[in-house]
Image (spheres, rainbow, N blue to C red):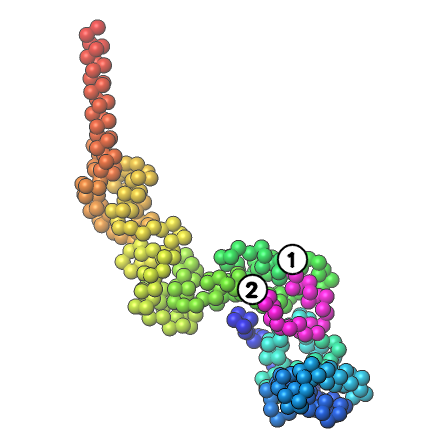
């Protein structure tokens, strides 16, 4: 279930009733064979694993559809019973809990909130299936299974989640407060009550196609920036969070601290080298390519700078190169002495070697023209 596998940040409530005891009372309202089917379907007997329709059908030599009919008959019989009416406070208590959690709650979160016992979970699942106040939406390709008290509200929430997903770019990374704001914009049709932030976040977790990464950022669940799958993805998240180049040793330490995942320095270094999202910008220093950094040696960086800006002073060259590489000034200046690549002009600036020759030839030609004009003027 990925990011949706989270437990409510509340303590398990103390119920005023014992789920198994209530379930046993209700099961006494149906015939023995029906009771056996219900016990097997909901894991209420000795075997806590919930049996499938097929498994029960094989046991009785009947079809799965017939088993389904027996199950539905048993549930309907219980709902019509006097015992069911007498136990109304139990269902009211469960409804109150669902309402306190926002009225729409992921199945797994609801039951992890209500109990830590598998047998009690089975009994509660049975009670909520019997209870007419509760509606279960089964898991689909879009949403996780969830319970609600108001099917119309649940449908509006699902529609809003679909609209929210549709507007997100594939690589979007959105802070939680902004994700909540966007979601609320799509929930404007639900204007009869105010929802707590905790409830809104719980609803966001209903959507399979949305996800939240360990840094609290939201986006499409298919994004590698949401579902971090290895050291490379963790390293990318660390650098993006840091906002500036980092040494691979720092990256490894940050992965361990932020994600509680052991990252060896050597492994981290190797992954940074192999992934095109990262650029080596100094000795052991890495940056994100999306920040504008490019690969290349110091001479190649100088060449790109001069090609873009034209002849520059040594100081200007150093300043521009250091925006792309973490190196000492002296290292950059030493590369300017490569006469096959760069040429020092008469005014102290540097240009690409070819540009330098062209500039010198142009200067000489201009000087010759000036001398010729002066000679012509003098002869008049």
Is residue 202 something that shows in the picture?
A: no
Q: Which residues are magenta?
A: 135-160
Q: Quadrant of residue 19?
A: bottom right
Q: Which residue is mark 2?
A: 209
- Residue 333's spot in the image, x, y percent? 22, 45
> Residue sitting at 68 percent across and 57 percent down?
188
- Residue 27's spot in the image, x, y percent? 73, 90
- Residue 79's spot in the image, x, y percent? 78, 83
In primary-sequence order, the first of circles 2 and 1 is 1
Label 1 sits on a secondary structure element that is helix
- Residue 128's spot in the image, x, y percent? 69, 80
Give left or right: position of 358 versus 293: left
Q: How many marks?
A: 2
Give left or right: position of 85 versus 230: right
Question: Looking at the figure, which quarter contains the C terminus?
Answer: top left
Crowd rating for badge 2 (residues with CA inside 10 Å; few <14, some 14–19, many 20+): some
Please determine whether, in this image, residue 341 is positioned above or below residue 283: above
Is 256 covered by the magenta stretch? no
Circle nearer the viewer, 2 or 1: 2
Q: Quadrant of residue 5?
A: bottom right
Give whichever of 100, 213 is nearer the camera.
213
Label 2 sits on a secondary structure element that is loop
Give whichever of 23, 201 is nearer the camera.
23
Question: Looking at the figure, which quarter contains the N terminus?
Answer: bottom right
- Mark seen at residue 186: 1
Q: In whole angstroms, how far apart are the C-alphas of marks 2 and 1?
A: 17 Å
> Residue sitting at 64 percent across and 90 percent down?
59
> Residue sitting at 20 percent across and 47 percent down?
334
> Residue sitting at 27 percent across and 43 percent down?
303
């Amino acid at each position: 279930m990925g990011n949706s596998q989270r437990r409510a940040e509340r303590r398990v409530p103390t119920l005023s009733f014992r789920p198994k005891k209530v379930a046993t009372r209700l099961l006494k309202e149906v015939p023995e064979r029906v009771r056996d089917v219900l016990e097997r379907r909901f894991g209420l007997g000795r075997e806590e694993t919930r049996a499938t329709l097929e498994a029960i059908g094989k046991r009785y030599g009947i079809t799965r559809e017939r088993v389904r009919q027996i199950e539905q008959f048993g549930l309907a019989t219980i709902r019509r019973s006097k015992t069911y009416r007498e136990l109304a406070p139990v269902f009211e208590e469960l409804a109150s809990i669902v309402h306190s959690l926002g009225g729409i709650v992921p199945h797994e979160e609801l039951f992890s909130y209500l109990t830590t016992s598998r047998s009690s979970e089975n009994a509660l699942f049975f009670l909520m299936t019997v209870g007419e106040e509760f509606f279960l939406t089964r898991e689909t390709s879009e949403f996780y299974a969830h319970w609600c008290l108001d099917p119309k509200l649940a449908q509006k929430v699902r529609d809003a989640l679909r609209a929210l997903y549709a507007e997100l770019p594939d690589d979007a990374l959105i802070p939680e407060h902004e994700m909540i704001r966007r979601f609320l914009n799509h929930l404007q049709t639900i204007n009869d009550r105010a929802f707590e932030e905790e409830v809104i976040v719980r609803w966001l977790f209903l959507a399979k196609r949305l996800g939240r990464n360990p840094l609290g950022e939201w986006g499409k669940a298919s994004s590698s920036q949401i579902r971090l799958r290895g050291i490379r993805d963790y390293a990318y998240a660390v650098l993006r969070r840091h906002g500036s180049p980092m040494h691979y040793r720092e990256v490894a330490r940050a992965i361990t601290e932020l994600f509680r995942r052991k990252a060896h320095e050597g492994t981290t270094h190797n992954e940074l080298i192999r992934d095109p999202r990262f650029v080596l910008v100094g000795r052991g220093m890495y940056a994100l390519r999306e920040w504008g950094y490019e690969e290349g040696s110091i001479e190649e960086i100088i060449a790109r700078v001069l090609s873009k800006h034209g002849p520059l002073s040594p100081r200007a060259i150093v300043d521009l190169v250091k925006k792309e590489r973490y190196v000492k000034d002296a290292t950059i200046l030493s590369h300017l002495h490569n006469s096959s690549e760069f040429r020092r002009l008469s005014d102290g600036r540097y240009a690409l070697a070819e540009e330098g020759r062209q500039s010198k030839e142009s200067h000489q030609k201009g000087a010759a023209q000036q001398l010729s004009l002066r000679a012509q003027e003098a002869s008049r």
